[in-house]
Amino acid sequence: MKLRLVRHLWGCDLSHGLQHYLPRWREVGYDALEVSIRFVPDREAFLRFLKENAFQWVPQIFSNDFHPGGTVREHLDSLRTQIQECLDHAPLFFNAHSGYDNWSLAEAEDFFGQALSLEREIGIPISHETHRQRFFGTPWQTRQILDRFPELRITCDFSHWVCVCERLLPDMNETISLAARHCHHLHARVGFEEGPQVPDPSAPEYALHLSAHERWWDVIWQSQSARGLEESTLTPEFGPPPYLHTLPHTNVPVADLANTCDWMAYRQKLRFVNAR
């Protein structure tokens, strides 16, 4: 099993294209980009960049966009529309913000059952992210659906669960293991008890948080290897302000976003090789 590093475009300045980022991305080892086609100002230029530079693409899709509420049908229709916009451009897989946190279990079962049917129809994996505001925003709701649908793929971003639960999940080992068995994609961001993103994961004051997340990522890699996956994909998905802390009254970020993402990418690439 090999590790594929994916670079997200959240917080990148896309107004002048992507070519100026290329040398740095090559140096780190990214060979795929993760972004919604709707967030790209020039679609043709973006798709041309992918092709000319041999980058894979992981489209982000958002059921019912970012509007709270919505019926199961509205969420499914919105996913289908966004998927159709990408199918002609060889997506590696889809990373989906799926469902709504206030749905009943019956509504969630209806949604994810139909989402699996949609995945079989298009023949491309749909990986549903563990994300706040979505139905997978808590470990308890996630577990109910994963128990119901063994074939469902998920994107594990445990930073959201740490924030929601306000703890480093000491009582969630079984749920972490279950999530690992469903994990298709990993968002390697470190959360803490009061937020989804530590200011700088290399800082010694967050060593405990980094260690906890890396233990969970190891469980994912072990599960993926046992399942016979040929590759594991990882996005160091640290975000810009307000996810990235800022100094009061100035809005100046307390850390450099690109450096943080690349530090995490280098670290996990080394850990992955040493774990093999």
Image (cartoon, grey):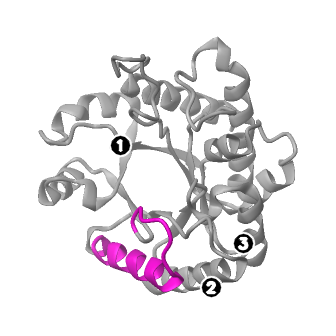
Q: Which mark, by number, is residue 70?
A: none
Kindly tell me whether residue 93 is visible in this rendering: yes
Find out whether residue 146 is within the magenta segment: no
The residue under label 2 is: 110
- Whether residue 197 is situated above or below residue 6 in the rendered picture: above
Q: Which mark, by number, is residue 10?
A: 1
Q: Which residues are magenta?
A: 65-87
Q: Residue 107 in the image: x percent, y percent?
A: 64, 81
Judged from the image, the secondary structure of the residue bearing numbered disc 3 is helix
Amino acid type of the residue tagged 2 in the rendering: Asp
Q: Classify residue 7 as left or right of residue 153.
A: left
Amino acid type of the residue tagged 1 in the rendering: Trp
Circle nearer the N terminus (1, 3): 1
Kindly tell me whether residue 123 is visible in this rendering: no
Q: Which mark, by number, is residue 145?
A: 3
Q: Classify residue 86 as left or right of residue 18.
A: right
Residue most extreme to the top:
204
Amino acid type of the residue tagged 3 in the rendering: Ile
Find out whether residue 79 is within the magenta segment: yes
- Whether residue 232 is situated above or below residue 113 in the rendered picture: above
- Magenta part mainly helix, strand or loop? helix
> Disc 2, disc 3: CB below 8 Å?
no
- Identify the residue at image location x=56%, y=64%: 128
Front position in the image: 221 or 82: 82
Q: Residue 187 in the image: x percent, y percent?
A: 54, 45
Q: Determine crowd level at label 2: few under 14, some 14-19, many 20+ residues with C-alpha closer than 10 A.
A: few
Judged from the image, the secondary structure of the residue bearing numbered disc 2 is helix
